[in-house]
Image (tube, rainbow, N blue to C red):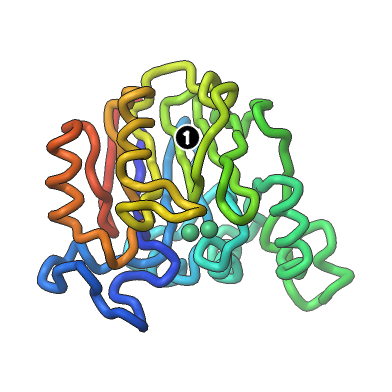
Amino acid sequence: MSKIIIMGSGAAPGVPCISRGFGDCNPKNEKNYRMRSGTYMELSGVRFLMDTSPDLRSQLLFNHIREIDAVFYTHVHADHLHGIDDLREINRIMKKPIEMFASEFNLGFIRQRFGYLLTDNNKEINPVYRAALNPHTFTYNESFYVNKLKVTPIALKGHNVEVSGYIFNDGEVVHFADFKSVDEESLKLIKQKPKVMIMPLTTLDGTRYHVGFDDLCAYAQKLQPERVIISHMAVECDYDMVRNMCQKVNTHIEPAYDGMVITWDE
Ligand SMILES: [Zn+2]
Ligand SMILES: [Zn+2]
């Protein structure tokens, strides 16, 4: 069985956020309580995380996740990265390093900030720390395997730092993080109708560096996934409001909420 858990469906400030509280979100709806961005998946027998948000500790505890085989990074903004140190708890349980995948640029940044976690330079930096992550980099549009899981990383464009999207098993699952556009050549690597596509919204109108609701719907219409899960939502995105907007456009699109579980047979 394949499984996805949306552990965090919020944008960088979370919902409620410190400056604006719940904003346009109804505080009476539990689905409007959002941790920062993070997803757990089990695909082709591989258990992995997309990103490690600053809320990772709470996310792993709430979802009873104690073991993972790999972690994939989309980009190095704090809301996607800064829970990285919590992975050491998983190492403590599994007694071995976790395989970690990031683009060359992202890995370079992680190495600079969190080098003590990496197996290849761990000892030089601090011999007391036990290695947590086994780093791997990749080339965009070139597939590789993690055991039986086929992974095709693609470049997402228009955010204010480099962002990697991931196509798993030729499109069975597609994961996009913060972006403004994607090249046609990259979209062609989605070779089957996706079962699940995870897309980031942030705000309904979009920003200079983020797509808006209409852009997401256009991608959904073009790629025709069985389910589109909208994540990475800020305080402008009330759950019921986004859900109603989705249903007017396409019944296959729906907003995520923290703890949302999606399963299907392989
Ligand atoms: Zn983000
Ligand atoms: Zn970002």
How many residues crowd mark 1 within 10 Å: few (<14), some (14–19), many (20+)? some
Residue 45: % across, % down: 47, 35
Left or right for 138, reference 203: right
* Screen quadrant of the C terminus: top left
Looking at mark 1, is its residue's CB closer than 8 Å to ligand 1?
no
* Residue drawn at x 31%, y 45% as measured from the top left: 213
Residue 179: % across, % down: 50, 46
Helix, strand or loop at label 1? It is: loop
Residue 225: % across, % down: 32, 26
Identified by mark 1, the residue type is Gly
Residue holding disc 1:
45
Residue 165 in view (yes/no):
yes
Q: Dividing the picture into quarters, in which one does residue 250 lie? A: top left
As rendered, which of 137 and 182 lies closer to the eye?
Answer: 182
From this view, report whether residue 165 is shown above or below residue 32: above
* Residue drawn at x 36%, y 62% as measured from the top left: 10
